Image (cartoon, rainbow, N blue to C red):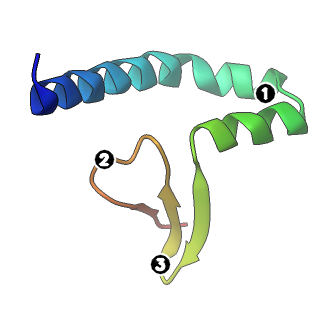
Amino acid sequence: MVGRERVEELERDRDDVIESYAGMLPDALDALSGEERRRLYGMLRLEVAPAPNGLEITGAFSTSGPRSIVT
């Protein structure tokens, strides 16, 4: 497999893993301590910042730029 094809395969694998864990995450997050939650967010490179209309969230899941959530 050549460069670009390999990158595309890895991106698909990443998306599959994230989707799989996303279903488990809400219940699992409730069981985590604050430190465990912080470590998980760090591994996901999750960042939340204020935005004019709510929050801007970026991280490993974000393939097309930041996601905005209006609160």
Q: Label 2 belongs to which residue? A: 63
Q: Distance between the residues labelled 3 and 2?
A: 21 Å
Identify the mark nearer the N-term, 3 or 1: 1
Which mark sits nearer the N-terminus, 3 or 2? 3
Q: Is residue 30 above or below residue 38?
A: above
Task: Identify residue for label 1.
Answer: 30
Residue at 31% from the left image edge and 47% from the top image edge: 63
Foreground residue among 53 and 21: 21
Q: Where is residue 49 in the image (x, y as percent from the top left)?
A: 60, 69
Looking at the picture, tell me which residue is in the foreground, 27 or 47. 47
Q: Is residue 25 left or right of residue 67?
A: right
Indicate the secondary structure of the residue bearing disc 1.
helix
Which quarter of the rendered picture does the N terminus lie within?
A: top left
Question: x, y percentage for residue 15?
Answer: 33, 27
Q: Residue at x 38, y 48 (%)?
A: 62
First in sequence: mark 2 or mark 1?
1
Which of the pair 33/44 is nearer the observer? 44
| Label 2, residues with CA under 10 Å away: few <14, some 14-19, many ≥20 | few
Q: Which amino acid does label 2 sit on?
A: Thr
The residue labelled by disc 3 is: 53
Mark 3 vs mark 1, CA separation in Å = 27 Å
Which of pointers 2 and 1 indicates the residue nearer the eye? 2
* Disc 3 crowd, CA 10 A, few/some/many (<14, 14-19, 20+): few
Identity of the amino acid at label 3?
A: Asn
Residue at 20% from the left image edge and 21% from the top image edge: 9
